[in-house]
Amino acid sequence: MKNVPKNSFTVADWVVFSGMLIIPACIGIYYALAGGKQKTTKEFLMGNRSLKMVPVAISILVSFLSAILILGAPAEMYTKGTQYYLYVFGQMAAAALAAFLFVPLFYPLKLTSMYEYIELRFKSRAARLTATVINILSSLIYTGIASFAPATALQAVTGFPEWASILLIGVVVTFYTFMGGLKALVWVDAFQAIIMFGSLLSIVTKAALEVGGFSKVWELNEQWSRINFWNFDFDPTVRHTFWALTIGGMINWVGTFGASQQSIQRFSALPSLREAKIAVLLNCLGLFLMVTTACLAGIAVFAFYAMKGCDPLTNKEINNSNQIIPFFVVQMLHLPGVPGLFIAGLFSGALSAISSNLSSQVATSWEDFIKPHVQNRSEKVHVWITRTLVIFFGILGLAVSFAVKEIGGTVLQVSLSFMGAASGALNGFVVLGTFFTSCNWIGAMVGPFVSYVVMMWIGIAKYSVIGVEGDLKFPTETCSADFNLTTPMTLMTLMPQENLHLLADSFHYLDRTVILTNITAGITTDATQVVKHRSALDALYSLSYLWYSTLGLLIAVIVGLCVSLATCPMKADEVDPKYQVRFCDWLCCCLPQSLRKKLNCCTGYNEDQTRDLFSDINVLLDGNKDNDNRNGIQTRQSQVLSAEGLWRSEISD
């Protein structure tokens, strides 16, 4: 790396940056000394179920966006164009669907570990532990990626070693999680979200002003083929299409917002179902603001370097695309304290994501593995066990972080790839449990397990065998004269025709149409044969990372149902209705009667009875002002509606 403004942090920058790390630690100390002082596991893990709605909504949001959004989304827009922006509409649809589908199902159950639901629904501890293990593994991978994102940024602007940044993040987040529990996490997240949004907004504003306004930003991006929203190709191996970004994105995120440990742990800590639903719905607004601003930052910074005529990534001034935004910050936002604020925003995002993962890992490990064996010990011992788990998973997350930093590609794609592989399996547990009465514990355990193994295999192969897809062209006309562009496309135009088939063999991971379009007209038949020869297996490995969750979910459900049917499926009267969403009965009613009976769907459903019960509950609510009785009635109401799944949107306070 050359011309990188190392050690460009001023004293003011270091003061601001340090302050952003000290404040979360102080919040952790405050909640260790205030209120119940985290003396019970209920307070430490669930905040006594008395948290505030808006901070919880923000906490859910930043738990899944973090520094990966601040670096990854702008880098995606910078290197590959604007099509990724459509992803936000899939995310928003997922948050809305989760609020009406999963929140009324899970909130009344008052779960500490989401995977308690698996045991309650399938009457199997083995299925519950399988889900817990998959969750812990996926959370550790996400922790590693979230730690690496700000570490590489800080190195780009100051030369501060990546390993030291990763260590610093791990120590700080472990400390305030250890001290303050869920209450500290939620309020730290709310504080850090402001820093994240402010840092992105400052980048957008500065870049746009330097270029000459947003109209000029748009014009420059159009000139370099960055404005490319509408690709309606149905090919699932195409990296980004309209369908992958919206439908694939929605399937990927609906479980994240409504049926993940991080989300359930937070909205279950609110005092009412109504507040829980609103908290999840507020993520639609938060997603739109955060993702839109991050994407605008990417195209604005690209327009700036296009106007200058030299891309720092191509010119080797930075190591990877994840350093584009911090490089711009140091070059252009050089007011005292501003670079420090930006890096603090990155670290804030990382701290939010990692603390959420820490909290979820501790909660699930405590509830699913340890609590059954220490029931007779004092509450003080229970709290110290959970705090010890914080330290254990903090150290484990650090180890994973050092491994993750060796993976190529934008942190955004890496994150969505490996998290998508896990979310398909985890969503499979929920879908099998909530929508299919016939699924038994064996199917619920085997289906998601097979899904996770297959999708991790595909994900690892994508990076180790296929590689990372090439970027769009960059401006280089004013770069140094001794710089040589050595991308695969340049090599293709320079190589002798008789060697073109060797090049196609070497870069078989590229989209076949790209290779055939860019190789000169004299391409030999051998090159085509090589690509065709490899296309069968590579088609699987080349699956767009946006479809990982969808494919994983399909594998989990299909395998789970097949195994259940082969091993004595459960009967309708064996499953408590409060653990199910029965609107799948609508879909089953079009099937032959014999198959409906075998699948136990569209049976035993009495619409009139449920409508009468719904009416009776509303009468009781109108006539009962006592909060305790009212909450109890609301709980019963939500259970009934969750069982039938027909009038969920009609639930009111």
Image (tube, grey):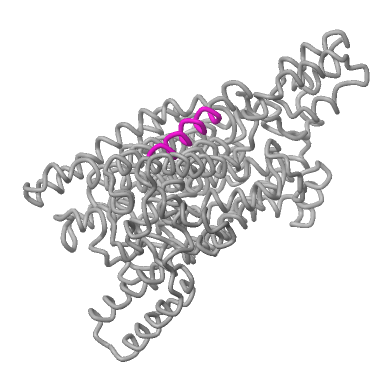
Is 517 above or below relative to 329?
Answer: above
Residue 198 sits above or below residue 52 on the image: above
Q: Position of residue 524 (x, y in %)?
A: 88, 14
Q: Is residue 437 above or below residue 446?
A: below
Q: Position of 3 compared to 179: left or right?
A: right
Quadrant including the C terminus = bottom left
Tally of marks: 0
Seen in the picture, residue 176 relative to 483 is either above or below; the reply is below
Q: Quadrant of residue 17?
A: top left
**Residue 296 in view of the camera:** no
Q: Which residues are magenta?
A: 445-459
Query: Could one spot residue 507 in this view of the protein?
Result: yes
Q: Position of residue 107 (x, y in %)?
A: 34, 64
Q: Residue at x 38, y 40 (%)?
A: 567
- Look at 69% across and 42% down and name the residue there: 240
Spot occupied by residue 351 in the image (x, y as percentages of width and height): 39, 45
Residue 474: image location, x then y, percent:
76, 34
To which quarter of the image does residue 591 belong? bottom right
Identify which residue is drawn at 29% across, 36% down: 393
613 or 430, which is in the foreground?
A: 613
Tell which residue pokes out farthest to the bottom in this image.
623
Image quarter where the N terminus lies is top right
- Residue 33 as seen in the image, left or right of residue 290: left
Judged from this view, the residue extending furthest toward the right is 521
Based on the displayed image, in which of its 4 quarters is residue 105 positioned? bottom left
Q: Residue furthest front?
A: 594
Q: Is-magenta flag for residue 120? A: no
Q: Is residue 451 shown in magenta? A: yes
